Image (cartoon, rainbow, N blue to C red):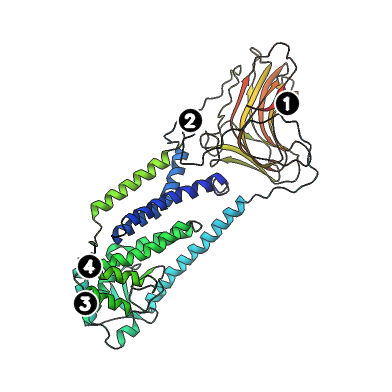
């Protein structure tokens, strides 16, 4: 799985633009609803969920071949578009380089870094949940008739039947609610509860209304989703911006609920300014998490033209449906796999089976791995393709040319309609590849074996740089020896580097008069 996805540049590029698209749409919607913090909070949440749902949906569509675009279309936007073909000039076989180190493939290190940092952030989230459990276990239950009456009144104002259990602890500086127990816990600072009577009953009612509004709005679910996505996509700057904005909007939306239930804005603002900020826990929602955004909250509370706090069920449902449709449309806007032509025994037409490497379950149909070679990796790559959704890859790190590694497919050649010449062509993508070959191999009835190169990829002379290019078409014609009974197409790698093969085709060629015995190989079309 890592080979197919994390270690693929195309996959990384696709993930970057798809997550950026979803998060950018969420951010733009948030800006559009900036005067309604409840709806802006909902839009940010949809953007965060969409930045994970879109890549997952695109991979499912690609695997199930549900793309909306016909095979061969270059208008797909659900994966990185291939570069246009570039003509390849004739090449001659290169000699083995005598010096030079193997190219350093950075993509495995990117994948390892991604997974390592994500694991640490997930561990941080688990530790935070454990800290909340420990905090709740060490907190003291608070039995106070005055607080209970205020809490009951706040629940009635918000239309809530479910009330949290109140606790007091020295571990919090301002009121906070922890919603991950069977019964939510309202945590109050010990100094505030046992100290001088600084707050009136109306102020306590406003405090409880704010914390219960978090519970009513289910902000704890949005917060944990944001933390999990930050752990998964920590390298995406828009994820961290969305998380920070989500926390701010959650507090602002709860402030709207407090004012909407009849509390005086100036008294409530004074109560907020009188609190000691509590650094926001990953799993507990405190009333004031920092002084940085407090001025903006107070200004919004004192604004007489406040919007309604409730976002509306129909509005929320319509936005969920619209976002889901957008994810499906973008995910399905990719090319379908080309139809597969089964290989037959009538090889007068020389039809290669599975030429675009799409068909198969655990292994590509009709294509065979050659013998295992130390330092060589065979990959059926579902993240890199010229067309469709798969290609065959050979990745070599060993500093030698032999033994050769190859993907092969063999066709039986009937005596009747024996072609004198065949053309082998295929699209090739190369990364620091010193030597790779499109090879045509012949076997006769006595087992005599020979071969000819139809395409050459890599350094031409000692000291030349290795091939490093996007998809290019390599094509060459070779003569078929008399008496050949089997033709084998070999997609080979000799030197270090990485090559991908796609859309391979073998066809008979009419021999032009006077050209017998000649062969053209290694030409790009």
Tag in front: 2 or 1:
2
**Secondary structure found at label 3:** helix
Q: Is residue 63 left or right of residue 473?
A: left
Question: Disc 4 designates what residue?
Answer: 304
Alpha carbon distance from label 4 to label 1 = 84 Å
Of marks 4 and 2, the one in the foreground: 4
Which mark is on residue 150? 3
Disc 2 or 1, which lies upstream in sequence? 2
- Is residue 383 left or right of 146 when viewed as pictured? right
Gap in angstroms between the C-alphas marked 2 and 1: 31 Å
Label pair 2/3, CB-CB below 8 angstroms:
no
As drawn, the residue found furthest toward the bottom would be 196
Residue reaching furthest to the top: 513
Measure the C-alpha gap from mark 4 to mark 2: 59 Å
Dot 2 corresponds to which residue? 71
Q: Secondary structure at mark 2?
A: loop
Look at the numbered disc 4 and give the secondary structure of its residue. Answer: loop
Q: Earlier in the sequence, mark 2 or mark 3?
A: 2
Query: Does 132 appear above or below 56?
Result: below
Q: Earlier in the sequence, mark 1 or mark 3?
A: 3
Q: Position of residue 402 (x, y in %)?
A: 76, 39
Mark 4 / mark 1, whichever is N-terminal:
4
Q: Given contact means CB atoms under 8 Å apart, are the residues at marks 4 and 1 in contact? A: no
Residue that numbered label 1 is attached to: 452
């Amino acid at each position: 799985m890592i080979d197919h996805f994390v270690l693929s540049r195309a996959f990384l590029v696709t993930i970057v633009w798809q997550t950026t698209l979803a998060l950018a749409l969420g951010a733009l919607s948030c800006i559009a609803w900036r005067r309604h913090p409840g709806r802006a909070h909902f839009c940010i949440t949809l953007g965060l969920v969409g930045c994970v749902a879109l890549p997952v949906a695109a991979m499912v569509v690609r695997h199930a071949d549900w793309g909306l675009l016909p095979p061969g279309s270059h208008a797909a936007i659900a994966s990185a578009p291939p570069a246009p073909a570039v003509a390849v000039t004739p090449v001659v076989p290169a000699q083995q380089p005598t010096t030079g180190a193997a190219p350093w493939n950075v993509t495995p290190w990117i994948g390892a870094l991604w997974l390592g940092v994500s694991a640490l952030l997930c561990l941080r989230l688990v530790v935070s949940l454990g800290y909340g459990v420990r905090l709740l276990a060490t907190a003291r239950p608070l039995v106070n008739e005055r607080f209970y009456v205020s809490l009951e009144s706040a629940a009635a104002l918000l239309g809530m039947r479910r009330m949290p259990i109140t606790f007091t602890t020295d571990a919090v500086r301002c009121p906070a609610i922890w919603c991950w127990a069977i019964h939510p816990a309202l945590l109050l600072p010990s100094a505030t509860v046992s100290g001088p009577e600084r707050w009136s009953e109306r102020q306590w009612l406003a405090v409880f209304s704010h914390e219960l509004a978090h519970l009513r709005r289910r902000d704890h679910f949005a917060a944990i989703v944001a933390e999990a996505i930050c752990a998964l996509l920590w390298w995406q700057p828009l994820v961290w911006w969305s998380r920070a904005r989500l926390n701010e909007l959650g507090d602002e939306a709860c402030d709207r609920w407090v004012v909407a239930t009849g509390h005086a804005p100036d008294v409530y603002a004074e109560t907020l300014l009188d609190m000691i900020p509590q650094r926001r826990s990953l799993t507990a929602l405190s009333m004031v998490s920092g002084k940085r955004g407090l001025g903006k909250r107070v200004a919004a509370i004192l604004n007489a033209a406040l919007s309604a706090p409730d976002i509306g069920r129909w509005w929320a449902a319509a936005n969920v449906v619209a976002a889901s449709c957008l994810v499906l449309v973008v995910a399905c806007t990719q090319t379908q796999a080309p139809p597969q032509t089964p290989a037959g025994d009538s090889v007068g037409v020389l039809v290669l089976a599975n030429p675009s490497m799409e068909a198969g379950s655990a292994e590509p149909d009709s294509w065979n791995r050659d013998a295992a070679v130390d330092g060589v990796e065979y990959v059926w790559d579902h993240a890199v393709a010229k067309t469709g959704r798969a290609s065959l890859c050979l990745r070599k790190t060993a500093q030698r040319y032999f033994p050769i590694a190859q993907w092969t497919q063999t066709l039986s050649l009937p005596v009747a309609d024996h072609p004198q010449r065949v053309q082998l062509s295929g699209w090739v993508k190369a990364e620091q590849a010193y030597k790779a070959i499109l090879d045509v191999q012949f076997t006769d009835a006595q087992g005599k074996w020979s071969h000819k190169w139809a395409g050459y990829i890599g350094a031409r002379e000692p000291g030349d740089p290795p091939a490093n290019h996007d998809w290019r078409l390599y094509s060459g014609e070779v003569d078929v020896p008399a008496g050949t009974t089997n033709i084998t197409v070999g997609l080979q790698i000799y030197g270090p580097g990485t090559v991908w093969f796609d859309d391979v085709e073998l066809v008979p060629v009419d021999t032009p008069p006077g050209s017998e015995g000649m062969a053209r190989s290694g030409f790009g079309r």
